[in-house]
């Protein structure tokens, strides 16, 4: 049979009696296997169909189109199903596959991305970015959808085996009302601290999510920031009441307070971020009035203050060796100080943006900034020289951080997805499943194998993020 156009995909029905043929510029055709007689055509007569695959029961057909759509045809009802109707890829969908139990589907696009989703609900579970750009003629899911085999590419013929899911939600760890904002692991990695708009700090077991203890003491409800001291027995919190409070992690007692009246600045000043120095001897805070302040951890005495253009500051961070201090906020302002003599080394502006997070690489040589424009940028920490080109989320990035080994960066925000990047922001390693609301905070566990997220729906979630090795982000080449 000659279809007059390049044939892109051929698949048999599970019974072997029929087969589907997808061509570059015609509808998909279902043929009788013995005679190759056309039984039915499916799709837009003027459109192209790259990928086509029967469900294991033979009742549905998963089709990928040249214009980036993923569609499911009900063979019995002779109609398109609504599942995946909102999917619109930027490139053509080259290949499609079902898991043997029919619960999961996968598809690959020309840009190299591969997605795994629930067949009935359409919920995307895994995104594998950039397998290899170009034609991916073969996808195959294992019965439990925990392994994916992919091959092909315009410039390579790599066959790769992926262990799935790349990111797995382990347990919900806490719940705040109405939203969770800040989250961090304890030093031992066994527990998670979180805070939000209910004015309560919650300590939860990282394994099963049960609440161990709640810390109350802040007034005016919102708690914006928490940080665990290097020794692991204490942590500090900052909130709408402007006070910095230091707590005993094990007993729940409030150890001491740096009260609001010691904060110079505007009326109703709010402390938005706080960070403990790596040696545990100093605190840095930043907030609404544009002041970056350094405090003696033991006594609460203010040691130093500098103002960054009187703009609202959302983030402050120490370098891992304690030698540098960075802050950033509204107007796209970011600056770095020498933490020993507290002289400003450099400042930059990315107007009219807001920078919501600054974070140092574990080696201390790079600074990561997360922007409300959706951008992520890297800077040389001591000079402020931009490194590489910015990358972008869809929507505001609320928070970003490095993994403890420095090989990955995690970012999250308004697009409701946590994305993991390589250490130079060259590409996305993988994306965790989409969450119900905006993600306000993310934190790696000390071993880097788990990640906690704080969500607008009030929940704190813990994800398993350990990747296969070797070739973590790229799968295993066999």
Image: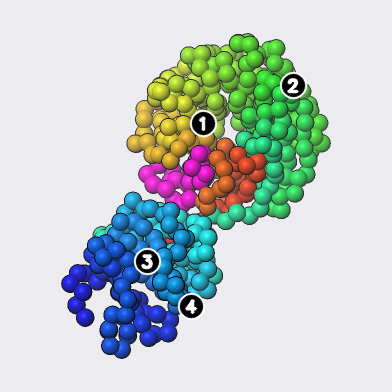
Which secondary structure, mark 1? Answer: strand
Q: Residues within 10 Å of mark 3 (few under 14, many from 20)?
A: many
Between label 1 and label 3, give the one nearer the viewer.
3
Q: Earlier in the sequence, mark 1 or mark 2?
A: 2
Under circle 2, the secondary element is strand
Image coordinates for residue 24, horizontal then vertical, percent? 24, 65
| Vertical relation: 474 (above or below) 279 | below
Give the residue number, with chain letter if any, for mark 4.
Answer: 57
**Disc 2 target residue:** 257
Magenta region: which residues? 405-431
Q: Give percent across and percent down for residue 71.
A: 40, 63
Residue at the (41%, 68%) spot, across then down: 79
Q: Is residue 233 left or right of residue 103?
A: right
Q: Which badge, 1 or 4, comes first in the chain's sequence?
A: 4
Q: Nearer the viewer, mark 1 or mark 4?
A: 4
Q: Is residue 378 visible?
A: no
Q: CA distance from mark 1 to mark 3?
A: 41 Å
* Residue tagged 3: 63
> In the rendering, which numbered label is found on residue 357?
1
Disc assigned to residue 107: none
Which residue is outermost to the bottom? 34
């Amino acid at each position: 049979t000659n279809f007059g156009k390049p044939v892109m995909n051929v698949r048999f029905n599970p019974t072997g009696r029929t087969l589907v043929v997808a061509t570059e510029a015609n509808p998909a055709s279902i043929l009788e296997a013995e005679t190759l007689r056309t039984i039915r055509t499916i799709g837009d007569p003027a459109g192209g169909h790259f990928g086509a695959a029967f469900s294991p029961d033979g009742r549905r057909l998963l089709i990928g189109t040249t214009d980036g759509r993923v569609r499911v045809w009900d063979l019995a009802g002779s109609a398109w199903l609504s599942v995946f109707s909102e999917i619109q890829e930027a490139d053509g969908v080259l290949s499609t596959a079902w898991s043997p139990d029919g619960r999961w589907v996968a598809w690959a696009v020309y840009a190299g991305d591969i997605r795994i989703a629930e067949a009935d609900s359409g919920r995307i579970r895994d995104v594998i970015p950039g397998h290899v750009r170009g034609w991916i003629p073969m996808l195959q899911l294992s019965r439990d959808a925990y392994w994916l085999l992919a091959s092909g590419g315009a410039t390579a013929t790599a066959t790769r085996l992926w262990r799935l899911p790349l990111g797995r939600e382990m347990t919900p760890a806490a719940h705040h009302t109405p939203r969770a904002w800040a989250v961090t692991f304890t030093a031992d990695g066994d527990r998670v601290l979180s805070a939000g708009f209910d004015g309560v700090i919650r300590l939860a077991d990282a394994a099963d999510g049960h609440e161990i203890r709640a810390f109350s003491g802040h007034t005016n409800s919102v708690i914006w920031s928490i940080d665990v001291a290097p020794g692991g027995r204490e942590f500090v919190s900052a909130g709408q009441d402007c006070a910095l409070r230091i707590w005993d992690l094990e007993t729940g007692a409030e150890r001491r307070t740096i009260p609001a009246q010691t904060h110079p600045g505007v009326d109703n000043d709010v402390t938005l971020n706080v960070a403990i120095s790596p040696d545990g001897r100093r605190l840095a805070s930043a907030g609404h009035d544009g002041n970056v302040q350094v405090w003696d951890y033991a006594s609460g005495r203010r040691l130093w203050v500098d103002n960054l253009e009187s703009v609202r500051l959302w983030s402050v961070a120490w370098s891992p060796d304690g030698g540098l201090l960075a802050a950033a906020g509204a107007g796209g302002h970011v600056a770095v100080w020498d933490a020993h003599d507290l002289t400003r080394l450099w400042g930059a502006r990315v107007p009219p943006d807001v920078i919501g997070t600054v974070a140092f690489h574990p080696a201390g040589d790079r600074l990561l900034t997360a922007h409300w424009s959706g951008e992520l940028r890297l800077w040389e920490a001591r000079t402020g020289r931009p490194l590489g080109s910015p990358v972008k989320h869809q929507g505001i990035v609320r928070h970003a951080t490095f993994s403890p080994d420095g090989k990955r960066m995690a970012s999250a925000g308004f697009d409701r997805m946590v994305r993991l990047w390589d250490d130079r922001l060259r590409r996305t390693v993988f994306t965790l499943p989409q969450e119900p609301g905006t993600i306000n905070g993310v934190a790696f566990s000390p071993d880097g194998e788990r990640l906690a997220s704080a969500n607008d729906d009030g929940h704190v979630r813990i994800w398993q993020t350990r990747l296969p090795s070797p070739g973590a982000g790229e799968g295993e080449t066999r």
